[in-house]
Amino acid sequence: MARFLGDEEGAAEGSAFGVELTCSVCMGLYREPVRLPCEHSFCSPCIRQVFATVEEGEDYRCPICRESYQDEPAMSKHLVLVRLVEAYSKMKDKKRHTHLEEVEDLDDAVENCLGERGCQIHRDEVVTHLCFKEWELMCPLCVSSDHHEGHTTKPLAEVTKDWKKMLPDIIEGLEETRAKLSVQILQYTELEEKAKGEISDAKERTEEQIDRLIEFLQNEKERLMIDMQHVGNSHLDSIHGLQSQTTRKLEDCENTISLFEEASGVQDQFTFVKDMMDFMQRMETLVISPDDEIVPPPLNFDGIPLPSVLETWKNEEAGEDSDDEEDEDSY
């Protein structure tokens, strides 16, 4: 269906005035119009693009009259055309608004009428073909477009005829597939029931083994806590002993400080010297080493035998199984 022209490329839509303002290269209204020496006018980008394709050694020619120029001709801006195009564009803008509303109404009506049968690209065309390469429905305009050149396309009537011939074979194949799938479902049901039984047995065995392991670990935990507490108490006793020794040294140091403070007030020289001699001898018995770092007594739990849980548990299980076998053999 024909549609209204709504842009500059549709300038020559029946108006003689519009034809005069149309570039013969792009067929749209002049943009930056320039004039050749032969008096023919073109859009500046259009004529420059034409001249850009001229190969070396060839002449430049006017696209309309074919006037020849050895060098690229000088072009002057066509101010009259510039003003005429501006005036014509304003006039067309007023008409375009009305035309666009009519076009939108027409497009909506066509689209509503065609529905899913309308072409996604050419909205006012009905799909008539199937492209097997792109796997999409097309209208006649799509079929003739460059995009689908070389593609395998068929009319919908031919595709329908071919596919309907294939339907019996397709249905027969699907019936066979359905029968096989039904058998497989029964087999999977049997496997499911078998797996449920195996899962239940495995859970019971594992739960029993874990309960026995928990009991064993609980006993080992109690033993370890007692042994570790013994080692810890011994370590704490060592710390308390060192702390008591340091406390006594602190008391001796404080008493000595008091005596020295008292001696500093003695006026009699004989008495002062005699007391200082006694204090000096007493200091030799004090072991005061404030610069020494505290060396904590070692705290070592390596002497406590830690259980190798897995090995012990396995050995225990192996021993019980051996006893059970011996009991069975005795019967």
Image: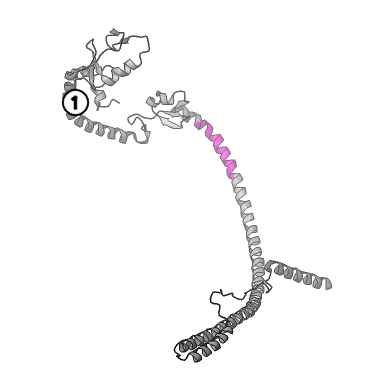
| Res 156 quadrant in image | top left
For the C terminus, the quadrant is bottom right
Say whether residue 225 is magenta.
Answer: no
- Mark 1 residue crowding within 10 angstroms, few (<14) / some (14–19) / many (20+): some
Query: Can residue 12 be seen in the rendering of this structure?
Result: no
For the N terminus, the quadrant is top left
| The one of 291 and 216 positioned closer to us in this rendering | 291
> Is residue 214 placed above or below 278 in the rendered structure?
above
Residue to which mark 1 is pinned: 89
**Looking at the picture, how far across and down is residue 237, in whole percent?**
60, 82
Residues drawn in magenta: 163-178
| Res 245 quadrant in image | bottom right
| The one of 208 and 234 positioned closer to us in this rendering | 234
**Looking at the picture, how far across and down is residue 201, in whole percent?**
66, 64
Dot 1: element? helix
**Looking at the picture, how far across and down is residue 95, in whole percent?**
18, 28
> Is residue 283 placed above or below 204 in the rendered structure?
below
Query: Can residue 154 be seen in the rendering of this structure?
Result: yes
